Image: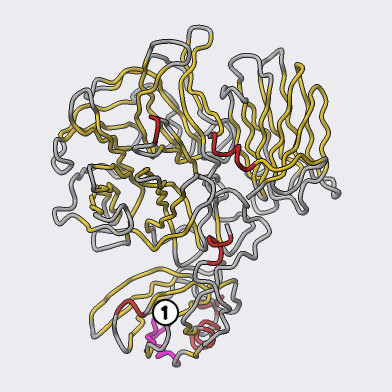
Amino acid sequence: MKRFFLLLTAMMTAGLMMAQAPQVLGKSHAMQRIGVKGHYLLLPVQEREENATVKVMAAGQQVQSLNVKLAVDQIDYYVPLDIQRFGAKDLLLDITFQGDRRFTGAMKDFVCWKEMKQSDTFDTQNRERFRPVYHHTPRYGWMNDPNGMFYKDGVYHLYYQWNPYGSQWENMTWGHSTSKDLIHWEAQPTAIEPDALGAIFSGSCVVNGSDVVAFYTSAAKSQVQSMAVSKDNGQTFEKYAGNPVLVSTEEDFRDPKAFWNEDIQRWNLVLAVGQEMRIYSSKDLKEWQYESSFGQELGCHDGVWECPDLMRMPVRGTDKQKWMLICNINPGGPFGGSATQYFIGQFDGHKFTCEHSDTRWMDYGKDHYATVTFDNAPEGRKIALAWMSNWQYANQVPTKQFRSANSVPRDLDLFEYNGQTYCGVTPSKELLALRGKTISKPTEACEVVVDLKGSMELVLSNDLGEQVVMRYDADQRTFSMDRTRTYASFSEAFPCKTVAPVYGNMTQLRIFVDHCSIEAFDAEGRMAMTNLVFPSKPYNNIKVKGGKAVIYEIKN
C-alpha cells in the first residue's frame, strides 16, 4: 500500500510559485493568465462552495474544461491540474462562478487567487484516519462505480468513476488501478477523459485477443454509448472514430456491460435504460442489434436501474448451470438508497427469462452498490467488486483527501435452498493471505472469524461507548447489524439497522473490519452485509455470546 499512497508524493511546499492576479470581468466571471513554470497548477478547494467552471485556453483554443469548488474564504485541500500536458508556455483560465455573491463577497477577495500555486509535485500521502488499509481507494479525489474490470496476463485492472478535481461527484473520468492479487493496488495514469461527447460514465471492458475494448457512456445533453480500444493492455485507450455506437431517445441510457457469448458466437451487451435492461448482440463490437428488454413487473422499481452484469454460473453440488442478471438500483434499496438486486434464470443470447417473482438482494448492508465482475477472470471465476457507499450520504462522509472505497473482492456462484436458486457471495480466497497472527482485541483493521453454536450476539465497541451490534437468530435464520450507536452526524440517513435472511444454518461468520467499514459474510456464502462505520476511535473491544471468536491482525 505504501507505493499506492506515495505515488507522486512530495511536500506541496516544494517549488511553489504564486499565480498572477486575476482579471475580474463581472459579478461571476474572471480570467487569469498562467505562465507555465511547473508540472501542476494546485487549485485550492472549499467544499461548501458551488462549482466554478474553469475553461483552460492555450493559444486561443480550449484544451480542457472542468468544474471545481474554488476556495472563497477557506481551503479544505488542493487538487492538481496538469498544465504541462498542453505543451504551452502560458495558459488562460476562463472562470465562471456559480455561487451567490451576496453570501460569498467580492470575487477579487477570494482566497483562491492568493493560494493558487504551481509545483512539479503533488502530495498524495495519506493523512485520513478513515482511509482503509486493505480496500482499494483512489489516491485522491472522489470515486464511485467500479468500471471496465478485466484480468489479463496476470494483472487485474480496475477502472472507476473518478473526479480528479475534488472529493465530491463531478468531472466523471475513468481512473485506473492494477493489482496482481486483488488486495494490493497500484495507481495508474488516467485512462479515459471527458471529450466533446460528454463526461465518461460507467461501462465495461472485454479482452478481445491482444486488444482490450472499453465500452462506456458518454454523458452530456443525452447519454450515448461509446467505445475505445487499448493496444497496451489497458494502459492507454484510443477512442473509436465512429462514436457513439449506440444512441436512444431515453433519458437514462447507460452503463454498457459487454461479454462474449460462446453459445451464439457473438458479443452481447446489456444496457440499463430507465427501469429495464436492454440486450443487444454484435459480431464486431461496432454494429449492435437490439434483441430484447427485461424487467417489467419483476424486481424492485423504486429507483433507476443501473450497472448491469449478466453471467452464466454452475449451481453448487449439481450439474446445472443458470444465468444471473445483476441489476443495481438507486434509490430502492431494502434500507434506503442504493443497493444491488439480482435475477436468476436462463439466457439464450437473445432473451433473459427470470425463474422467480420475488425481489432478491445480493448484499443486505446499506453500502454495497454498482456491483460488477471482472471480464476474463482466471479459472472461470466470477469475481465482483462493489462501490462501498450509498448515494444518500456519499458526498458527505467525513473524509476530505478522498471519498469512497471498493468492497473486498467477492466470488459469486449459485446454490439451492428449499427448491430455489440463490446467489452465493464468498470472500475471495486472496483475502486469506491478509491473515497475520491472532490477537486478543480487535484493531482498526482486522478479520474476525466466529464459530457459531446457534444464535449469537457480537458487539464491537470503543472506550467512548460507540458500538456496532451484530446478531444471528438461528430460529428465524436472520443476521442483523446495528450501527445506530456510531458516529453519524453528517447524515440523518446514516444510522440504521440492516437485516438479512440466511438461506440455511450459519455455522461460521467472517467479519472484515477496516478503518471505516464492516463486511460480514456467512462462511458458506449464503449471506453478505456491507456497512460503513465512522467511529470516533477504533473499536478495540469485543463481546461474543453464543460463539467463539478468533481475531486475525491484517498482514499487509
Q: Residue at x 81, y 37 (%)?
A: 542
Q: Residue at x 33, y 71 (%)?
A: 65
Task: Answer left or right for 488 relative to 148.
Answer: right
Give the tally of numbered discs: 1
Residue at mark 1 = 28
Residue 165 drawn in magenta: no
Residue shown at the point (27%, 83%) measured from the top left: 58
Mark 1 closeness class: few <14, some 14–19, many ≥20 residues within 10 Å: some
Q: Position of residue 384 (x, y in %)?
A: 46, 37
SS of the residue under disc 1: loop
- The residue nearer to you, when weighing 391 against 441, is 441
Check the picture and name the quadrant holding the N terminus. bottom right
- State the image coordinates of residue 431 (x, y, percent, origin top left): 58, 39
Q: Residue at the top extreme? A: 419
* Position in image of residue 66 (x %, y %): 37, 69
Q: Residue furthest bottom?
A: 21
Please say which color scheme the image uses: secondary structure
Residue 274 image-quadrant placement: top left
| Foreground of the two, 100 or 16 | 16
Identify which residue, 407 or 33, lies in the foreground.
407
The image quarter containing residue 270 is top left
Magenta stretch in the rendered image: 21-33
Residue 304 found in image quarter? top left
Q: Residue 322 in the image: x percent, y percent?
A: 37, 18
Asked if 72 appears above or below 207 in the picture, the reply is: below
Dot 1 amino acid type: Ser
